[in-house]
Image (tube, rainbow, N blue to C red):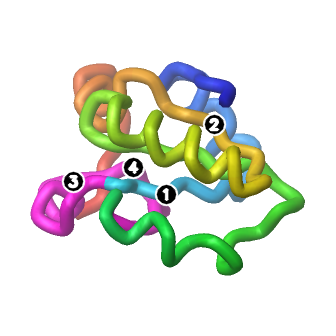
Amino acid sequence: MRSITVHQLKDVLAQGEALVVDVREPWEFAEGHVPGARPVPMSQAPTLVGTLPTDQPIYLVCAVGARSGQVAAWLGQQGYDTVNVDGGTQEWVTAGYPVEH
């Protein structure tokens, strides 16, 4: 499993479309998330298998990077190209990057 910083994710997003999956709980997601992120709580990660593209990286984010790291590792075992976002949404917000509500 690869990992990147929130600064690197911002650069990836600036280059065009990227698939970002936010594995936090719905109430956390509603409080603010990386623009364009798709909400899929960690407990629902198995529902992602078969629904995600296999020809592009999948960037996983949570609050600080722990839950997303677990989901990234698991999805990686299922054959997906996963990238964990270290620092998660908390670091994204701290860096002053935009959030959607």
- Identify which residue is drawn at 76% across, 46% down: 81
Q: CA distance from mark 4 to mark 3?
A: 7 Å
Foreground mark, 2 or 4, reads: 2
Residue position marked by numbered label 2 in the rendering: 83
| Whether label 2 touches label 4, CB < 8 Å | no
- Identify which residue is drawn at 36% across, 23% down: 87
- Identify which residue is drawn at 39% across, 49% down: 34
Q: Residues within 10 Å of mark 2 (few under 14, many from 20)?
A: many
- 43 part of magenta stretch: no
Task: For mark 2, give the secondary structure.
Answer: strand
Range shown magenta:
24-41
Q: Is residue 101 left or right of residue 83?
A: left
Q: CA distance from mark 4 to mark 1?
A: 9 Å
Residue position marked by numbered label 1 in the rendering: 21
Q: Is residue 58 above or below residue 39?
A: above
Task: For mark 3, give the secondary structure.
Answer: loop
Query: Where does the C terminus fall, quadrant-wise?
Result: bottom left
Q: Which residue type does callout 2 highlight?
A: Val
Residue position marked by numbered label 3 in the rendering: 32
| Whether label 2 touches label 1, CB < 8 Å | no
Label located before the other in sequence (3 or 1): 1
Q: CA distance from mark 2 to mark 3?
A: 21 Å
| Whether label 4 touches label 3, CB < 8 Å | no
- Identify which residue is drawn at 63% across, 72% down: 49
Q: Residues within 10 Å of mark 3 (few under 14, many from 20)?
A: some
Residue position marked by numbered label 4 in the rendering: 34
Q: Which residue type does callout 1 highlight?
A: Val
